[in-house]
Image: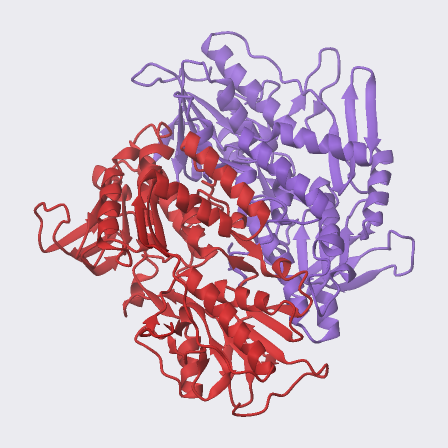
Chain colours: A red, B purple
């Protein structure tokens, strides 16, 4: 190691974990029985089950169903201290992390799992008009905008403004964008049926705008095609190869052909009441800060390039995992392949980094990270999803209702905490039969500060 | 009637209901089968089950469990149009209500059920430091402050500031104040047990500050005494006859003797991390506006004095119900008695006002309102509550675990919507056995704008 680890008065190595998403959580859990002192720092008080965040944004689930208090998760792991705080600076020279409140935390081993945030590709001015979906606060804000748009349309007397209020645009056709668009279409067609007296909610238009040539580009082409068909069946208007050129308070401008092969090449103005940004992610700013301080490199998305064992060049005491890491998967006798930015990748990296910490403490050589790809799945809406499983016998691909059930139970299985699982299952069962979404509640209908 | 009612093109009388709390909701439901056109306007998109709002504030329930979308409640009542909006002015001369968005609503019959808000007795500057508990936004803000206080204490190194962060003050010992204080004590003693490494949450102090000589003054003295004993058993420090003289960012000043008969007469400074205001309610500003426009009188709390049939003097087309009304209960052969500001009162007034609307439409004389008092109950915390029932055989009073079970099932029974009932029951069952509170989630830990 470049410099010998200091230790605590207790003599136990100090492991500092920044961030309690999938990567940080799994790293700390992997160290459950280890004779170390773990400190985990997060900006929020909860671990968020991100794959279902769109359900909170679309009023299908209450926030506590997909968020568990971090302290509760580590209650029975006495070697973990949980701190609510924001890391403002990391100083490798002194092995110290600085928090916003002025306090400092020293480490012998640092695992950085700070994740990612939205990227507006340099158009940060768009954020207030087109919120992304990363945090519970984001989800509440999107829920507010969607529900208030329908409410405003019921009050609105001008037909043009009313039409705009009933137009919803989702930008980016990755898993989140596809899930958002499909669910918004369901809400308009089914959930709100019969509740309005002046408007017909089913006349709402849901647009899914994608810059690339197909939806779900991480998926095989055949499944992208199935997903597109299922979206169109739900009434979603999909615009492929469509570039957003501007977003303002009342709508957006896109340059595109219509995916449905119809007319209208070139630039369109679309007036809409609600825009959701699901297009780009960028690594946490902590990545570049860390790179600058350690001489590590970052990729275009700001992710930190790590060594095969997930540590930084020349800094075996510092590992980066999850969305913040530009990591490769190493299989014996094969070319390294990039690890995708999905939750299983983050979990596996977290566990691997923790295992390597234990190896270092034991004076053993570290191991290269190998990503196990169990496949890829995305849901589109009621009864429809696409699944691409990697099996020992080769890929297994299916879509439709069976895929949807598979998606449903896979997500419930991985939800943290039995109670949540049970409640989510119940909510979905009742939602399935009633077409209802019970969390259609807005605490404060007033527009939020742009800072939020 | 002072002036003949106009009618709609459909010829059906227009009933305008302002506010969808207990009073407004029951009024609209009472008119379910009536040949009228009902419009109900509310500032939020949900009907709130206020008696359980403290459970959301103390992280025991998720917001959707006690809030139902107003449109969903009236989905199968076609004579109701629901509008999200804020009434800025009521003009009796033209029988028109003005909304913040500029739209206007005419009425043939107006039922005003705008409810009440907090009163800081002229010290409105206290509000940012001591939020009240009336809306879901209030509940989220109190939840945030309570949970973040414990988090900040875990990070804090200065023992004096740490002690202050672990001191919680509830001002006002009515039902809400008693419920808040009892639950906060439970959270400190049980819920957070074993989750912190640097502080002992059970060392937190919960103060309940009451200006009057006893807690739950609406209750018989014997039950107030039982409630006091149960609060003290839970570890709540109750200060009776204590007047708050100032509140600032770091604590408050009270003039009081200690209720426990100990030393310390006179003025005390109490540094605390979190202050909850449960002391005063004031009628919605709409009350004075309406009084000024119609010549009706208001009482000191700003409630509108109504005639026996709940209408306004000289304005049979305008009724006021719920917390906004200073109403009397009229029993044949008895002196009129004031109607208490509780949810059963609001519900009964709403139904009575609606019935009188139907009588007017039918050309029949209206009936005087009679309040049926089914009793009074309040919970203090786990296993403890006080119940005062009015029965044909005279009052029936009990406390302790039986009273708590009675309170529990009474509240679940009156919850709107089966699903909510079931979920709440389940949440409470799991909370009861595990001592856990599953909604310990803060969307955004940053301090809110003072405007919120």
Using the rendered image of the protein, determine whether residue A108 is visible from the camera's viewpoint.
no
- In the rendered image, residue A283, in percent from the top left (x then y), is placed at 38, 71
Q: Is residue B229 above or below residue A256?
A: above
Using the rendered image of the protein, determine whether residue B239 is visible from the camera's viewpoint.
yes
Question: Residue at position x 39%, y 77% from top?
Answer: A304
For residue A292, which quarter of the picture? bottom left
Q: Left or right of A134: which side holds A16?
A: right
Farthest bottom residue in view = A3
Viewer-proximal residue among B420 and B286: B420
Question: Residue at position x 67%, y 59% from top?
Answer: B274
Question: Residue at position x 32%, y 73% from top?
Answer: A334
Question: Residue at position x 62%, y 28% from top?
Answer: B414
For residue A267, which quarter of the picture? bottom left
Q: Left or right of B14: which side holds A364?
A: right
Q: Is residue B237 above or below residue A438?
A: below
Q: Is residue B50 above or below residue A280?
A: above
- In the rendered image, residue A330, in percent from the top left (x then y), is placed at 38, 73
- In the rendered image, residue B192, in percent from the top left (x then y), is placed at 70, 57
For residue B213, which quarter of the picture? top right
Total numbered badges shown on the rendered structure: 0
Viewer-proximal residue among B275 and A256: A256
- In the rendered image, residue B136, in percent from the top left (x then y), is placed at 54, 45
């Amino acid at each position: 190691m470049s410099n010998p680890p200091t230790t605590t008065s207790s003599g136990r190595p100090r492991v500092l974990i920044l961030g309690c998403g999938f990567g940080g959580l799994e790293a700390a859990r992997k160290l459950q029985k280890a004779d170390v002192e773990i400190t985990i720092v997060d900006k929020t008080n909860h671990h968020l089950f991100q794959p279902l965040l769109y359900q909170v944004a679309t009023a299908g689930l209450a926030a506590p169903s997909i968020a568990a208090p971090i302290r509760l998760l580590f209650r029975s792991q006495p070697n973990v201290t949980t701190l609510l705080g924001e890391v403002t600076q990391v100083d490798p020279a002194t092995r110290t992390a600085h928090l916003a409140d002025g306090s400092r935390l020293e480490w012998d081993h640092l695992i950085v799992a700070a994740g990612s945030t939205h990227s507006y590709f340099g158009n940060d001015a768009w954020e207030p008009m087109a919120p992304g979906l990363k945090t519970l606060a984001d989800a509440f804000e999107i829920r507010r905008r969607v529900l208030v748009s329908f409410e405003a349309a019921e009050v609105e007397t001008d037909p043009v403004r009313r039409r705009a209020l009933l137009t919803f645009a989702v930008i980016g056709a990755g898993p989140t964008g596809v899930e958002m668009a499909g669910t918004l279409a369901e809400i308009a067609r089914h959930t709100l049926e019969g509740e309005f007296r002046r408007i017909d909610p089913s006349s709402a238009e849901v647009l899914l705008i994608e810059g690339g040539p197909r939806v779900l580009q991480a998926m095989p082409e055949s499944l992208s095609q199935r997903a597109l068909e299922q979206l169109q069946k739900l009434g979603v208007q999909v615009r492929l190869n469509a570039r957003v050129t501007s977003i303002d308070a009342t709508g957006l401008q896109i340059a595109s052909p219509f995916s449905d092969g119809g007319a209208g090449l070139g630039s369109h103005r679309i007036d809409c009441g609600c825009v959701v940004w699901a297009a780009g992610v960028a690594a946490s700013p902590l990545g570049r800060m860390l790179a600058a301080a350690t001489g590590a490199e970052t990729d275009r998305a700001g992710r930190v390039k790590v060594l095969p064992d997930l540590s930084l060049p020349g800094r075996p005491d510092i590992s980066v995992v999850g969305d913040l890491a530009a990591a490769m998967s190493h299989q014996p006798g094969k070319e390294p392949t990039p690890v995708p930015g999905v939750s299983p990748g983050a979990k596996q990296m977290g566990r691997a980094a923790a295992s390597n910490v234990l190896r270092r403490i034991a004076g053993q050589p570290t191991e290269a990270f190998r990503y196990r790809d169990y496949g890829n799945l995305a849901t589109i809406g009621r009864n429809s999803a696409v699944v691409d499983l990697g099996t020992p016998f080769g890929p297994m691909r299916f879509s439709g209702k069976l895929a949807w059930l598979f998606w449903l139970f896979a997500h419930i299985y991985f939800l943290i905490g039995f109670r949540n699982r049970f409640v989510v299952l119940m909510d979905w069962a009742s939602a399935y039969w009633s077409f209802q979404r019970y969390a259609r509640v807005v605490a404060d209908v007033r527009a939020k500060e742009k800072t939020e």
